[in-house]
Image (spheres, rainbow, N blue to C red):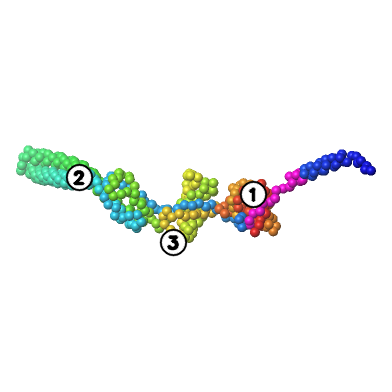
Amino acid sequence: MDIARTGQAEKRRRRNIIIAAGGLLLIGAITMALARLKPAAPTVERQTVWVDTVKRGEMLRQVRGSGTLVPEDIRFISAQVEGRVERIPNLPGITVTTETVLMEMSNPEIERNAVEAQAQLKGAEADYQSLRATVENNLLNQRSQVNQIESQSAQADMQAEADKQLFTQGITAEITYKRSHLQADQLVKQAAIERNKYQEAEKAAQAQLAAQRARVEQQSALYDLRRRQVDSLKVRAGIPGVLQDVPVQVGQRVVAGTNLARVARPDKLKAQLRIPETQAKDVRVGQDASIDTRNGEAPGRVSRVAPSVQEGTVLVDVAILGPLPQGARPDLSVDGTILIEHLANVLFVGRPAYGQAQSTVEMFRLTEGGKEAVRVPVKLGRSSVNTIEIVSGLKAGDQVILSDTSAQDGFDRIRLSG
């Protein structure tokens, strides 16, 4: 006979509830444990990052900029008069002397003015010579008259003296002596008057000649001006060098002041560098520099710093101190490095791809063995072209990643493989 089993369904139901509750508690515990776990460190290929070692010692603080070679001695040749370009015998690139004719122009009006000025000068010179002959002849006549009166006065003096002696001896009458003496006095006065008239005539003649001579000089200056204007129709280089540019064409009509050509001396070049405005604040005249022409380097020295900023850069002129490398020529693209200062006994490292001078950044420092790198805050100091000063956060011998690590933002540790 079977015995009925009671309470089994209730037991099974309780057991299932307990099992379900335990399962839920286990899942919650696992979830909380997983939530507290840190994310796994990402892996980065060692060959894809740039690693450098922190050093202590002397750091050269430098700035760099690109630019071009330009001649120190450049002459822009402009038209002195209006004219029409008739001939351009020389093209850019040739070597020229001071007298090399770069261009020939024409202007009939200027040529006609020169001919007229020459004719006026010759007329003024002829008038001067004619006036000079006239006044000299008048002065000769006046001088002759003075000499004649002086001779008559001398004769009257001798006659008066003779009559005086005869009157004393009682040979001649007193009236004769007085008459001759009076005549001698009159001739003396007349001779003095004639001499004064001659002196005044001489002064007047000199004034007339000076006025006419001034007119001649005026016409001569005008003719020289017209002649120089005609000569300027043949445009010359003015300095020895290389013809760099001729911006006009044959047949073109130009006005006075138009730029016709540019001549430069290729043996004296300087570098014009464009330094970023954030780095140019420490550039000073007299600082040493190095110019890279991509075919060699040449030492230089800063000779000028532009006072204004243009398009985010400052123009800096660097005088070349030594011979230029072969192939250096005007308008050649160059790179220049300017030495700002020597920093002694400082911590420094290669310049990272992120972070500016005098700022704080986070860098990945390699752990022992170099298999991992941890993020550390680093305070940066003064910067150079390829290096930057470490103020705090690192020590000599530490290895840090300088490459861009923005892809690992949010991770305090990375693994390096390879």
At x 27%, y 47%, the residue is 84
Tag on residue 288?
Answer: none
Q: Earlier in the sequence, mark 2 or mark 3?
A: 2
Position of the N terminus by quadrant:
top right
Q: Is residue 104 left or right of residue 127?
A: right
Q: Residues within 10 Å of mark 3 (few under 14, many from 20)?
A: few
Vertical position of residue 55 compared to residue 33: above or below:
below
- Residue 66 lies, in percent from the top left, at 49, 52
Of label 2 and label 1, which has the lower sequence position?
Answer: 2
Image disc number at residue 408: 1
**The quadrant where residue 347 appears:** bottom right
In front: label 2 or label 3? 3
Q: Dot 2 lies on which element? A: helix
Name which residue lies at 77% across and 45% down: 30
- Magenta stretch holds residue 34: yes
Q: Is residue 405 left or right of residue 252?
A: right
Residue kind at label 2, given as amino acid type? Glu
Q: Which mark is residue 326?
A: 3
Which mark lies nearer to you, 3 or 1?
1
**Residues rendered magenta in the picture:** 30-46
On the image, numbered disc 2 is attached to which residue?
116
Q: Are marks 3 and 1 in contact (CB under 8 Å)?
A: no
Please identify the quarter of the rendering in which residue 165 is found. top left
